[in-house]
Amino acid sequence: MNTFYTFYIGNADGVTATNTVSGLMGLKGQGQAWPNVGNAKRTTYGGVSGNAIRPIALRAVSAIANALPGYPILATGGIDSAEAGLQFLQAGASALQVCSLYNTEFLHIYGFACIYT
């Protein structure tokens, strides 16, 4: 059973799709993790967010909207423009979280508006 369906049958008012996903930044040619810290050259998994996860987030929104038509979905992950926001609305989102825009264009933002369909 999908996690979002569990929330639905549990009477949640809606669902957020998606949030930061786990990732590994990279490996150097000899297999050493990058970035790494200390003499042991250790690393850890970190959070990947913003535009890098837009395809994952769009898929999640689309899957939920197709499985549960009309169920409220707050779309997050890579919404940095009106065009990106429209993609999420077309995929089935009910509302948008526009943090990627603030992270990349902070000095050019003069206001914030939530979009509901």
Image (spheres, rainbow, N blue to C red):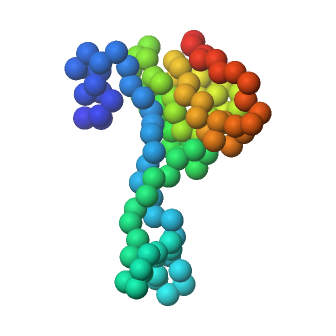
Residue ID at (38%, 25%): 15
Where 94 sits versus 62, above or below? Answer: above
85 to the left or right of 97: right
Residue ID at (61%, 45%): 51
Q: Residue 103 placed where, x, y %?
A: 63, 41
117 to the left or right of 13: right
Of residues 27 and 36, the one nearer the viewer is 36
Q: Give the quadrant of residue 109.
A: top right
Of residues 63 and 6, the one nearer the viewer is 6
Q: Residue 9 placed where, x, y %?
A: 24, 20
Residue ID at (50%, 52%): 48
Residue 93 is at least partly visible in this image:
yes
24 to the left or right of 99: left
Q: Residue 116 placed where, x, y %?
A: 57, 13
5 to the left or right of 74: left
Where 69 sits versus 27, above or below? Answer: above
Of residues 43 and 70, the one nearer the viewer is 43
Q: Give the quadrant of residue 97.
A: top right
